[in-house]
Amino acid sequence: PRDESNIAMVDPFISNFAVRDVTPPVLLSLFPAANAREVAPEAVLRATFSEPIAGGTLVLRSANGDVVPAQTALTLGNTALVLSPVNFLPANATFTATLSNVTDLAGNPLAGGAVTFSFQTVDTIAPLITALAVQGTARAGATITIVPTIDTSDVERVEYQAGTLSRVVAISPYTTAIALALDATELIVTARAVDASGNRSAPFQITVPVAQ
C-alpha cells in the first residue's frame, strides 16, 4: 500500500490471529470397554480423547455405590485421563465408572456429555449343579433324558459321562438323551457345568437303576 504522497510502506505488516475454538473434544476409547468381562484386578481405567483436555473427573464405584479410592491423572499430552485404584479390584465384582466435567483447552465440553460405563472383574466362581433329574422310564433298551439343575445362568456347556459315553451339551437347558443298553441294570451319570470364564463345577453324579 501507499500513502497520499504515493510513498510505499517500507516493511510489510503481518498480522496473525486464531479463530475461536468451538470444536468439542470427542471420547475416542475407554478401557475397560463398557460391559467388559474378565477385567484384571490390577486394571487401570483410561479414557482417551481427540484433543488435549484441560481436565475432567473420572470416578469408580462398586456395585453398592461406594467410591473406590483411586488417583487420577492426565497423560499422553493431556489426551488421556487415567484412574489408578489404590488397591487391586476384587474378583467376581461389578464396577461402574462415571466420566464427567471434561473440557478442552478452549473450555468446550465433551461431545455427548457425561459417560457412565460398567465392567466386571475376573470370574473365579464355578457354577454348581444341584440335581440331575431323569425323564422317561429307565428300562433296558429305552431312552431317558437327563435334566440338570444349575445354580446360575452363566453356563457355557455341561459335560456328561454316562458309562462309556462322553457328551458335551452347549445349548440351554443342557439336557441330554441317553439310550439304555439292552443288558443294562444301572447307569452312572456324571455331569460338570462350565461357565463362560472356563470355571468348571465339581462333578455331580447319580446312579439310575435300569429295569429289565
Image (tube, helix red, strand yellow):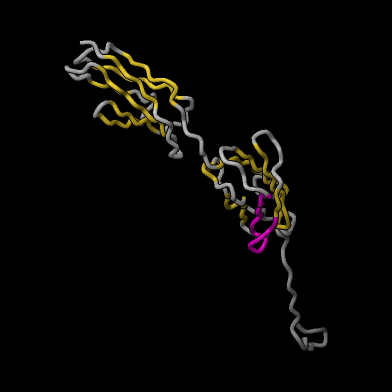
46 up-or-down from 142: above or below:
below
At horizontal 58% and vertical 53% (from top left) the residue drawn is 28
**Residue 54, quarter of the rendered image:** bottom right
Where is the N terminus found, in terms of image quarters? bottom right
Direction from residue 92 to residue 173 in the image, left or right: left
**Residue 18, quarter of the rendered image:** bottom right
Determine if the magenta segment contains residue 81.
yes
Direction from residue 185 to residue 14 in the image, left or right: right
Disc tally is: 0
Q: Position of residue 183 (x, y in %)?
A: 17, 17
Direction from residue 198 to residue 66 in the image, left or right: right
In this view, the residue in front, 168 or 59, is 168
At horizontal 67% and vertical 53% (from top left) the residue drawn is 24
In this view, the residue in front, 76 or 146, is 146
Direction from residue 171 to residue 196 in the image, left or right: right
In this view, the residue in front, 145 or 138, is 138
Determine if the magenta segment contains residue 141.
no
Overall secondary structure of the magenta stretch?
A: strand
At horizontal 76% and vertical 80% (from top left) the residue drawn is 13
Where is the C terminus found, in terms of image quarters? top left
Q: Position of residue 124 (x, y in %)?
A: 51, 39
Q: Where is residue 195 in the image (x, y as percent from the top left)?
A: 44, 34
Q: Is residue 76 visible?
A: yes
Q: Give the range drawn in magenta.
A: 73-86
At horizontal 71% and vertical 37% (from top left) the residue drawn is 66
85 up-or-down from 191: above or below:
below
Q: Can residue 8 be seen in this view?
A: no
Q: Position of residue 58 (x, y in %)?
A: 69, 48
**Residue 177, quarter of the rendered image:** top left
In this view, the residue in front, 138 or 77, is 138
Farthest left residue in view: 182
